[in-house]
């Protein structure tokens, strides 16, 4: 095992070292067919990807390859497309689909599971750590229920780009190694209006240290299978949370460690959501089966990026009525989901009060994470509630007065406060600049803000450097993703590559790339894929 300073050697695909601890250590479903079924007494089913007609690489992430110790030059090989299109396995892979359940839109949904995700295996990374490789859209599994196990190009481009964009923004997330088209056609009813049509199929290879979800614990707990619940929890604690100091397998894990684990999951989840609020990301489907036990953003479906700042916005057409998963509600949903997770592990931790206390730490951890990020967004050395609270509340009130682009606004706010700062901020306004009411409110706000900075002795230069590290210039605007999808659907992968290139350095001003940082054009306001999205993917 090399330490951080040891030279990192990259390997070819065939030389990857598979350790497969999940399938090595945990109980498997004895049946290996894809017949849809309830799987009890087991945490996963062995299943192979379905072969596709003509696998072809659309895009790869060299950084993600390096992360798992794979030579980035391998991304372009024919063998790579075969393996990551589901047509071949590398020796050492042990493919499987995981069983999990979940609360969907607030209701217990029973067994769900990897209906179209197939884990290929766990690779030993350059520093000895394990990375699970998972194909999304690689065909039927026992958990596919009545669906086809496939994914289409548009949703796969969106998942590939957003995973990597989030990583470069510093938001905890699963990663994406590759995007491969299958050469097969997939039938989808994009608007759920009875007009199904054929679309190109695609497969993303996702990478994470673990794909275990809150719902992975809820399923055995719902069936009263405490032994299976314990098997899974102990495996996750030992492999993914070594800092908790659990004894090695063979010795029982004491109840306090389960409580400490829940507390750590609460902390990570709170920090993740604070990051979403910082960058204007709306997950769109925060069901408990879409919540990673590692506190990573997972399952990029009908997600979206705020353009006009609006806490009530959701990109998900399926959620347009109740707006359960709207931007401004995400922290409350995370807290609710954590309560579901903690309830599932009550049989292990025993002490309900201690678990409740761990879950209730969400509020303070979230507030601390969010105010810390807000301080950076505003260029404040730290967030002093008494002074800065009212300043922030007033700013967010103003941002809602008229449609104002969140990303552009905060980026422009970092400019010098001399001259006409409100005039410069008007670049963020949709329509014809600021209306008189907004302008007046902003003029007053800028005066308070300038006074606050003067009182703190913060000068424009350092303030800008601080803010530019927290306020991205480039995010994956919904319409930019759609333009890349349109090109990919015509057989031109360059749109995806160009966008990925921009999103690799989201906090740097990139000369010649102003159009990627501009307001959403009017034509995109109501175009499908550019504003609202359905779950059809
Ligand atoms: P999602 O809301 O996309 O996270 O999916 C919820 C559940 O539906 C998960 O168990 C997925 O595996 C399953 N699912 C979604 N789409 C498909 C599909 N095309 N084929 C099989 N299962 C699917
Ligand atoms: Mg899901």
Image (cartoon, rainbow, N blue to C red):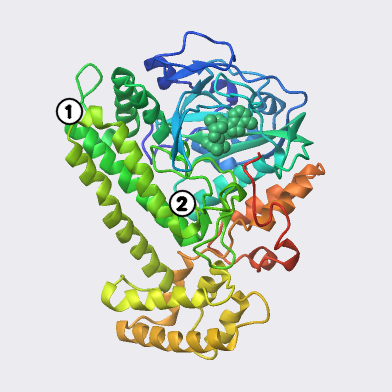
The residue that appears at 38% across and 43% down in the rendered structure is 337
Rendered-image quadrant of the N terminus: top left
* Numbered label attached to residue 65: none
The crowding category of the residue bearing disc 2, from other C-alpha atoms within 10 Å (few below 14, some 14 to 19, many at least 20), is many
As measured in the structure, the alpha-carbon distance from the residue carrying label 1 to the one carrying label 2 is 32 Å
Q: Is residue 90 visible?
A: yes
The residue mark sitting in front, 1 or 2, is 1
- Tag shown at residue 171: 2
Which quarter of the figure has residue 3? Answer: top left
Dot 2 falls on a residue whose secondary structure is loop
Say which quarter of the image contains residue 222: top left
Query: Residue 87: horizontal and vertical position, in percent?
Result: 68, 20
Q: Tag 2 or tag 1, which sits nearer the N-term?
A: 2
Q: Assess mark 2: CB under 8 A from ligand 2?
A: no
Residue 360: image location, x then y, percent: 25, 49
- In the rendering, which numbered label is found on residue 254? 1
Looking at the image, which residue is at 64% across and 49% down?
A: 533
Q: Is 372 or 533 nearer to us in this picture? A: 533
User: Tag 1, which secondary structure?
Assistant: loop
Q: What is the quadrant of the C terminus in the image? A: top right
300 sits to left or right of 367: right
Q: Is residue 275 above or below residue 192?
A: below
Check disc 1: other Cα within 10 Å, few if <14, some if 14-19, many if 20+: few
Asked if residue 512 shows in the view, the reply is no
Who's the residue at 49% across and 17% down the image?
38
Residue 399 shown left or right of residue 521 in the figure = left
Measured as percent of width and height from the top left, residue 527 is found at 73, 57
Total numbered badges shown on the rendered structure? 2
Instruction: Establish if 39 lies above or below 307.
Output: above
């Amino acid at each position: 095992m090399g330490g951080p300073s040891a030279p990192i050697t990259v390997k070819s695909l065939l030389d990857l070292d598979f350790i497969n601890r999940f399938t090595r250590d945990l109980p498997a479903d004895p049946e290996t067919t894809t017949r849809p079924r309830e799987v009890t007494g087991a945490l996963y089913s062995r299943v192979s990807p379905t072969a596709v007609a003509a696998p072809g690489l659309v895009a790869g992430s060299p950084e993600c390859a390096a992360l798992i110790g794979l030579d980035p030059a391998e991304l372009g090989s024919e063998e790579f497309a075969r393996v990551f299109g589901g047509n071949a396995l590398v020796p050492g892979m042990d493919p499987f689909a995981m069983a999990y359940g979940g609360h969907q839109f607030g209701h217990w949904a029973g067994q769900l599971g990897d209906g179209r995700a197939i884990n290929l295996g766990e690779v030993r990374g350059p520093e000895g750590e394990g990375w699970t490789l998972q194909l999304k859209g690689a065909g039927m599994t026992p958990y596919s229920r009545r669906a086809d196990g496939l994914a289409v190009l548009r949703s796969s481009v969106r998942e590939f780009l957003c995973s990597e964009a989030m990583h470069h923004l510093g938001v905890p997330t699963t990663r994406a190694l590759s995007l491969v088209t299958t050469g097969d056609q997939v039938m989808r009813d994009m608007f759920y209006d009875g007009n199904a049509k054929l679309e190109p199929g695609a497969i993303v290879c996702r990478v994470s240290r673990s794909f275990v979800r809150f719902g992975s614990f809820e399923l055995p707990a719902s069936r009263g299978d405490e032994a299976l619940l314990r098997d899974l929890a102990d495996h996750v604690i030992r492999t993914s949370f070594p800092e908790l100091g659990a004894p090695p397998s063979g010795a029982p894990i004491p109840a306090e460690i389960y409580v400490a684990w829940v507390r750590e999951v609460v902390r990570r989840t709170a920090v993740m959501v604070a990051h979403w609020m910082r960058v204007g990301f709306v997950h769109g489907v925060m069901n408990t089966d879409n919540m990673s036990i590692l506190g990573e953003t997972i399952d990029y479906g009908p997600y979206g990026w705020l353009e006009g700042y609006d806490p009530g916005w959701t990109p998900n057409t399926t959620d347009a009525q109740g707006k359960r998963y709207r931007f401004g509600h995400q922290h409350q949903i995370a807290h609710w989901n954590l309560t579901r997770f903690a309830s599932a592990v009550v049989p292990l931790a025993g002490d309900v009060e201690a678990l409740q206390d761990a879950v209730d730490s969400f509020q303070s951890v979230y507030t601390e994470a969010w105010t810390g990020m807000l301080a950076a967004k505003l260029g404040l050395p730290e967030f002093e509630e008494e002074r800065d609270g009212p300043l922030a509340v007033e700013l967010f009130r103003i941002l809602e007065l008229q449609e104002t682009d969140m990303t552009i606004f905060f980026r422009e706010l970092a400019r010098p406060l001399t001259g006409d700062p409100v005039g410069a901020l008007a670049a963020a306004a949709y329509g014809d600049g600021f209306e008189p009411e907004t302008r007046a409110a902003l003029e007053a706000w800028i005066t308070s803000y300038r006074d606050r900075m003067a009182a703190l002795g913060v000068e424009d230069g350092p303030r800008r450097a601080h803010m530019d590290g927290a306020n991205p210039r480039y995010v994956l605007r919904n319409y930019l993703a759609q333009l890349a999808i349109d090109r990919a659907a015509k057989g031109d992968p360059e749109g995806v590559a160009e966008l990925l290139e921009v999103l690799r350095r989201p906090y740097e001003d990139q000369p010649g790339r102003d159009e990627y940082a501009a307001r959403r054009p009017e034509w995109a306001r109501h175009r499908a894929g550019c504003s609202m999205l359905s779950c059809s993917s």
